[in-house]
């Protein structure tokens, strides 16, 4: 399901984000599978020169790591003895542990390589409020947890929770006219970029990314906003996804439908322009940036050498089953790639599970 972050006014934007959560919690219909699109190409490496859609899928094995398929709840345990309710963001640390933002349980869950699920203790804020609706989790090399929470209580707040290994908690302030929905890890500097939108004084909006640093208790340095004239649909300019590549390029998703690149030199340009994405929730790339993986409306797509292929996706009877290629039923949300690039881990929001796909 695609959401359109209309940000003409801050209050409207907040209500629409709230609506996104409610809709996602009950949405399970199959997305249509698309093939090649019209107006395919000019000679540019930023386009899919040839769109190759393999409807039989590749022979890739999908396995569920944790959670009981189609059963929501909250329970720690091993494998399918554990229960989740809205698995969203996912992170993989060097020791092989996975961390999941369990958004409707208001928890961060840890999964060991053996599939043992536990709940990570998150301290209370000074005002005694607890973590609510964690959506994105990133973990620094020193073990610091960086959590983006999209709280949709009656007063609606966007909050960042920074939890140090010793339990210290920091909640840097987010400006009232800024709305952040995703976070990307810098592969070299061990810091992060946060993305979303910013409303302006005249009631309009623009997309925004900023370096994830705490400066005087306020988020962000090095802010960047593309000109709305550079965006396909300037009415909805929110940057809804970000991935920082090893090649220095930031891959940005605008309005969940369009992928752009922002180079080190400041070039901002749409890529893969001859394919109509339906609703992108996650984008990542391998270390040499030659292959880009996209979680698009439940499917996992791989784009390599300007060829696009479906890896796995929703398949009747839509029961969240494991299997090889087209025998599996997948609705992917957020993804993370293993260090050896052989395995793609992902959250399956609709089936309340954490899963992996073996790429090699």
Image (cartoon, rainbow, N blue to C red):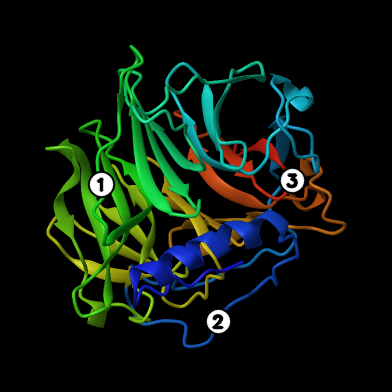
In the picture, measured across the screen, residue 215 lies left or right of residue 302, that is left
Q: Among all residues in the image, which is located at the extreme bottom? A: 39
In terms of depth relative to the viewer, which is nearer, 156 or 323? Answer: 156
In the displayed image of the protein, which residue is found farthest to the right? 317
Observer-side mark, 3 or 2, equals 3
From the viewer's perspective, tell me whether residue 107 is left or right of residue 28: left
Residue 328 relative to residue 273: left or right: right
- Label for residue 351? 3
Is tag 3's residue or tag 2's residue first in the polypeptide sequence? 2
Q: Relative to the observer, which residue lies in front, 35 or 126?
A: 126
Q: Position of residue 174 (x, y in %)?
A: 26, 49
Q: Is residue 141 above or below residue 355?
A: above
Q: At which x and y percent is residue 336?
A: 49, 39
Instruction: Tell me if mark 2 has few (under 14), some (14-19) or many (20+) residues whose alpha carbon lies within 10 angstroms of its own.
Output: few
Residue at the image point whose x is 57% and y is 42% from the top: 103
- Of the numbered discs 1 and 3, the one sitting upstream in the chain is 1
Circle 1 residue? 247
**Pointer 1 local density, CA inside 10 Å: few below 14, some 14–19, many at least 20:** few
- Give whichever of 228, 186 is nearer the camera: 228
SS for dot 3 = loop
Q: Position of residue 86 (x, y in %)?
A: 64, 44
What residue is drawn where x is 58% and y is 56%? 21
On-image quarter of the N terminus: bottom right
Q: Residue at x 45, y 23 (%)?
A: 122
Vertical placement of residue 12 versus 83, above or below: below
Query: As rendered, which of 108 and 139 lies closer to the eye?
Result: 108
Identify the residue under disc 2.
37
How far is mark 3 from mark 2, CA to CA?
30 Å
At mark 2, the secondary structure is loop
């Amino acid at each position: 399901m695609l959401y359109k972050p209309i940000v003409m006014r801050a209050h409207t934007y907040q209500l629409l984000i709230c609506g996104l959560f409610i809709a996602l919690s009950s949405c399970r219909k199959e997305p249509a599978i698309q093939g090649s699109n019209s107006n395919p190409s000019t000679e540019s490496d930023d386009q899919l020169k040839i769109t190759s859609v393999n409807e039989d899928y590749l022979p890739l094995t999908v396995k569920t790591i944790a959670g009981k398929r189609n059963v929501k709840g909250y329970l720690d345990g091993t494998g399918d003895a554990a229960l989740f309710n809205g698995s969203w963001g996912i992170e993989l640390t060097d020791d092989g542990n996975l961390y999941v933002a369990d958004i409707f349980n208001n928890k961060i869950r840890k999964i060991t390589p053996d599939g043992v699920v536990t709940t990570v203790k998150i301290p209370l804020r000074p005002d005694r409020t607890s973590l609510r609706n964690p959506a994105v989790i990133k973990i620094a090399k020193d073990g610091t947890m960086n959590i983006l929470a999209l709280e949709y209580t009656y007063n609606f707040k966007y909050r960042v929770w920074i939890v140090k290994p010793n339990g210290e908690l920091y909640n840097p302030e987010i400006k009232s006219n800024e709305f952040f929905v995703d976070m990307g890890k810098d592969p070299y500097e061990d810091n992060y970029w946060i993305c979303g939108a910013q409303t302006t004084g005249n009631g309009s909006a623009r997309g925004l990314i900023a370096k994830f640093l705490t400066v005087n208790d306020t988020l962000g340095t090095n802010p960047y906003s593309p000109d709305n004239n550079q965006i396909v649909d300037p009415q909805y300019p929110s940057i809804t996804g970000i991935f920082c590549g090893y090649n220095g390029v930031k891959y940005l998703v605008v309005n969940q439908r369009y992928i752009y690149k922002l180079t080190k030199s400041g070039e901002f340009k749409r890529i893969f322009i001859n394919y109509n994405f339906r609703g992108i929730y996650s984008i990542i790339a391998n270390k040499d940036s030659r292959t880009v993986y996209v979680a698009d409306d439940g499917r996992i797509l791989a784009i390599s050498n300007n060829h696009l292929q479906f890896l796995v996706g929703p398949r009747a009877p839509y029961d969240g089953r494991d299997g090889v290629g087209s025998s599996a039923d997948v609705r992917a949300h957020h993804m993370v790639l293993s260090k050896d690039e052989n395995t793609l881990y992902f959250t399956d929001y609709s089936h309340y599970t954490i899963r992996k796909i073996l790429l090699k």
